[in-house]
Amino acid sequence: MFTTCTIGHLCSAFGMAQLFQKNVQPFIYGLLPVIYLVAILPETSNDVFRLGETVGNIAMYLYGLMPLVLLVISIWRGKKREATP
């Protein structure tokens, strides 16, 4: 479990660093409070399972809807470019 969390932390920091075109180290340290809060908030094992279900549902909607949104945007931008001479 520790290695999974560590890799997730590092990938998140690298992704944010590339997104904002900054150095990775501030993002590594900046994500530590978020990780701490996510680890401390659930009080019982039921809360942990509920959090896991919530994250899974959000991911399902995000990965299900995001490609459709990007497809609509690409089609819209393609038509916009064809209309300009």
Image: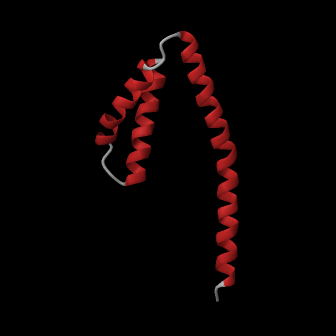
The residue under the point 40% across, 27% down is 35
Q: Is residue 62 left or right of residue 13?
A: right
Q: Is residue 36 left or right of residue 61?
A: left
In the displayed structure, 78 sits above or below 31; it is below
Res 36 → quadrant: top left
Q: Residue furthest top?
A: 44
In the displayed structure, 74 sits above or below 40; it is below
Q: Quadrant of the C terminus?
A: bottom right
In this view, the residue in front, 54 or 8, is 54
The residue under the point 32% across, 51% down is 22
Res 60 → quadrant: top right
Can you give x and y, in whole percent of width and height, for residue 10 in the image?
A: 40, 34
Can you give x and y, in whole percent of width and height, for residue 61 in the image?
A: 67, 40
Can you give x and y, in whole percent of width and height, for residue 23 in the image?
A: 30, 47
The residue under the point 56% across, 23% down is 51
Can you give x and y, in whole percent of width and height, for residue 3 in the image?
A: 45, 22
Q: Residue furthest bottom?
A: 85
